């Protein structure tokens, strides 16, 4: 599933291709992906509008229109944008498409149909209703540490909880735990203040690096855990063997012995 860095890349693509362009028409091929209005209402509300800006919070991307309303793009596992001119280039699993006055199109492709598209008249109300936490790249160290106070959950469960911090998913949570040498199942209340500060700093560093490299995995540093995330694989310099278990309900990769369990 796309996490914060991947959605940041989607945002850059959206901004580059689709802002300030009049939407001449909207075609919906599969209305089930639009969750809170019917497809006719979606088409009516967006036709002849323009996207004037975008806002990303964690894994959520919001396109703001010239009437102040928003379209939420939540990409699920396989959602993606494609900007094209020739109808022959239409993505195979396009669910809907914005057709701009200049003749180009922004299609939303989603093979597995797990994406969620919403039309929002009150962005702040929606964020409050779903309880979306502060963005992982925006939250301050002070606020991050405050959110840890009194928590007994695993550190991985904490990082994955989008109501606490928005944007970190399974892949980057494992990376954060690896780089801080902390076992993902470690209990927050068993961690020392220096561990918690290290987790915050490492989270910021990892996400910033991934964003700067447009979430292109082949460009990630060679010493990242991502490179060894295969069960049974031996790590360089005798750091251990990759193990798999369930932590916070998610498949979790870690180096046995190298990452210390605090419980």
Image (cartoon, helix red, strand yellow):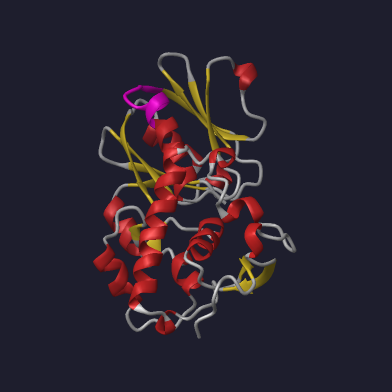
Locate residue 9 relative to residue 127 in the image: left or right.
right
Q: Nearer the viewer, residue 149 or 193?
A: 193
Q: Is residue 8 left or right of residue 257?
A: left
- Quick check: 233 above or below 70? below
Of residue 256 and residue 64, the one placed in the foreground of this image is 256
Q: Residue at x 51, y 58 (%)?
A: 169
Residue 172 percent location from the top left of the image: 51, 56
Relative horizontal placement of residue 8, taking residue 86 as reference (left or right): left
Asked if the stretch drawn in magenta spans residue 103, the answer is: no
x then y, percent, for residue 178: 53, 63
Q: Position of residue 134 (x, y in %)?
A: 32, 59
Q: Position of residue 143 (x, y in %)?
A: 26, 67
- Name the image quarter holding residue 261: bottom right
Q: Nearer the viewer, residue 242 or 140?
A: 242
Horizontal side of 19 relative to 242 (left or right) equals left
Residue at horizontal 61%, vertical 67%? 254
- Res. 21 image quadrant: top left
Residue 165 in view in this figure: yes
Work out which residue is located at the far right of the displayed protein and give it: 232
Please give the range of residues in magenta: 15-23
Q: From what the image shows, is residue 69 above or below residue 246?
A: above
Whether the magenta-drawn stretch holds residue 20 is answered as yes
Reply above or below: 195 against 14. below
- The residue that appears at 53% across and 45% down in the rendered structure is 221
């Amino acid at each position: 599933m796309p996490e914060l860095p991947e959605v940041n890349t989607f945002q850059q693509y959206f901004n580059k291709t689709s802002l300030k362009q009049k939407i001449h028409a909207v075609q919906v091929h599969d209305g089930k992906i639009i969750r809170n209005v019917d497809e006719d209402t979606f088409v009516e509300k967006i036709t002849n509008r323009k996207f004037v800006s975008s806002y990303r919070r964690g894994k959520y991307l919001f396109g703001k229109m010239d009437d102040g309303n928003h379209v939420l793009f939540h990409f699920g596992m396989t959602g993606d944008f494609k900007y094209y001119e020739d109808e022959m280039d239409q993505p195979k699993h396009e669910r809907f498409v914005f057709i701009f006055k200049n003749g180009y199109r922004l299609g939303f492709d989603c093979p597995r149909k797990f994406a969620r598209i919403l039309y929002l008249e009150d962005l702040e109300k929606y964020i409050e209703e779903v309880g979306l936490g502060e963005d992982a790249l925006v939250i301050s160290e002070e606020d991050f540490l405050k959110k840890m106070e009194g928590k007994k959950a695993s550190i991985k469960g904490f990082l994955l909880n989008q109501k606490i911090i928005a944007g970190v998913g399974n892949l980057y949570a494992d990376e954060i735990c690896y780089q801080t040498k902390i076992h993902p199942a470690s209990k927050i209340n068993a961690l020392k203040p220096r561990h918690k500060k290290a987790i915050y700093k490492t989270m910021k560093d990892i996400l910033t690096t991934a964003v700067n490299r447009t979430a292109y995995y082949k460009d990630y540093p060679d010493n990242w855990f991502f490179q060894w995330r295969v069960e049974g694989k031996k790590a360089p310099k005798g750091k251990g063997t990759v193990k798999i278990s369930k932590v916070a309900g998610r498949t979790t990769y870690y180096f046995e012995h190298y990452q210390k369990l605090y419980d």
